[in-house]
Every structure is written in structure tokens, then in C-alpha cells.
Image (cartoon, grey):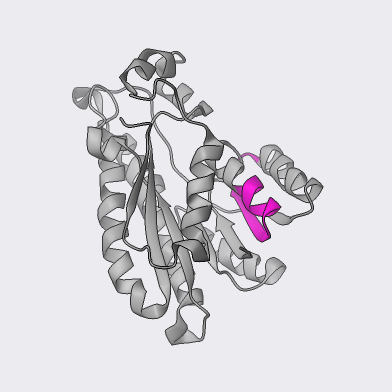
Amino acid sequence: MGGVLVITGASRGIGAATAKLAGSRGWAVAVNYNASAEQAGQVVAAIGASGGKAVAIKADVSTAAGARLLFAETVRQLGPVTGLFNNAGIVHTYTAITDMTEDMLAEHWRINITSQFLCAGEAVRRMSTKSGGTGGAIVNMSSRAAVIGGANGMLAYGASKGAIDTFTHGLSIEAAPQGIRVNAVRPGLIATDIHDATGDKERLKKLVGLVPQGRVGTAEEVGETVLWLLSPQASYVTGSLVDIGGGR
């Protein structure tokens, strides 16, 4: 395993856990963040302490300029990109359909969907064997909410992740002849602070009873799956949506 890996939204949660695992296993990691400079620095420091190499790069990847900046700086500081984990995303407080605003929906689409299109475009442009690249792999962040639906307050989030499932399937077909594999992970109930953004700090405790395995997952468990999908061990896996939900 190894190469240069870009992880968007890598200052906390699943992105941070994946970055640390990747750094300990030979990847040079671009730790992208938009607002959490201190947390991103802590991730980079942890990777360095484990003997790995990483840099923190501030960029709003929901904009074309931000995505271009992220990849240009990654290449300048670390070298040619060979992997992308499209992880950046948001949730809002529980909101019924009757209370959703245009601005709320636009933010979900921009951060959860547009950012993945823009970053994948930058990655394919650089990794494609048809343009002189050596190929590579992309892993998109979806969610079990794409299947469950995100009802009762998380409809916008669930719908945005449903779009990522379709995007992953279509991009895997487009990118395969260019030496690039594209897959997605669909985490279920994972112990990260993103759940606090729903306004319910007891959310995991309330829902864990619905999980057949009887527990919530960890960010590291998701990271392990992401790294496998990026690795040569998954060389014949593309267009797959991998559920990480304990059976739910």
C-alpha cells in the first residue's frame, strides 16, 4: 500500500481516522479541511508521530477553485495523486419536510454532492492513464441513509447520499477504461461527533437497538474498509457500494 492520498474533510471523524491509518501504512496523506485548522494539524502531527508523511491543506472543496487548489497543493507538496477519499459532508438538525428551506437544501447538495463531483474530476484528470497518469482509486462517502431514506428529519441528507450511490456507479463505468476504480462506503451508526449536528446528542443510544450486531461502529472500522478499497487487494472491485452498518 502507498502512494499519495487526498482525503477531504479529514480534520475529524471518519476522515481523520482514515488519514491516520493511511499514514501509518505508507500513504502520503493530504489532510483537507475548511475551518478546523487546529484539528487538521493534530491529524498531521499524529501521522508524523507514527512515521508517516502528511500535510494539512485548507480548501473549500464545494467550489471549483477550492478543489483545484487542494489537488494542486497536494501535487506540489507530496507528488502525483493516486487515491482520493471523497469524505467531506454535513448533516443539519432534524428538520421536517415542511420546515426545509431552499438554503438548507442548497448547502446539502453543494457540500455532500457537488464537492464529490468536483474532487473526482480533479482526481480523474490527474490519475487517468489516458492523460499520462498511472491510474488509481476513488472511494466516495455515501451512507446507509441512502437506503433507509433519512426519514423523520434527515431527508435532505439521505437524498444527497442516494445521489452519491448513483454517481459512484456511473463514474466507475466512465473511469474504468482510464485505469481508475471507483467505489463507495455506506456507513451506518458510527461513533463520531457528526451526530451532534442533528440536535440529538443521544441519537446513537436511541438507535443502537436497531442494529443486529447490537453496537455502533467505529471510525477506524470505516477507515479499514476505505483503505482496502484503495489497495491493490481490491484490484477487481469497482462500482461497489460497501455497507458498514452492523447489519442494519
Image coordinates of residue 94 in percent, x first then y, are: 33, 22
Compared across the picture, whether 11 is left or right of 83 comes to right
- Is residue 241 visible to us here? yes
Quadrant, the C terminus: top left
Say whether residue 30 is magenta. yes
Q: Quadrant of residue 40?
A: top right
Name the one closer to the observer, 89 or 132.
132
User: Residue 106 location in percent, x, y?
Assistant: 32, 43
Number of numbered discs on residues: 0
Q: In the picture provided, is 126 more to the left or to the right than 236?
A: right
Q: Is residue 140 above or below residue 160?
A: below
Quadrant containing the N terminus in the rendered view: bottom right
Q: Position of residue 48 (x, y in %)?
A: 78, 50
From which residue to which does the magenta span run? 19-36
x 69%, y 67%: residue: 78
State the image quarter where residue 187 is shown.
Answer: top left
Instruction: Give the image quarter of residue 98.
Output: top left
The residue lying toward the viewer, choosing from 246 and 194, is 246
Q: Is residue 30 left or right of residue 106?
A: right
Is 5 placed above or below 192 here?
below
State the residue at coordinates (73%, 40%).
42
Could one spot residue 117 in this view of the protein? no
Name the spot of residue 24 as percent of width and height, x first. Answer: 70, 51
| Pick the front one: 133 or 212 | 212
Residue at 81% x, 46% y: name it.
Answer: 49
* Residue pictured at 47% horizontal, 22% vertical: 196
Front in this rendered view, residue 28 or 37: 28
Q: Is residue 106 above or below residue 25?
A: above
Residue 157 forms part of the magenta stretch? no
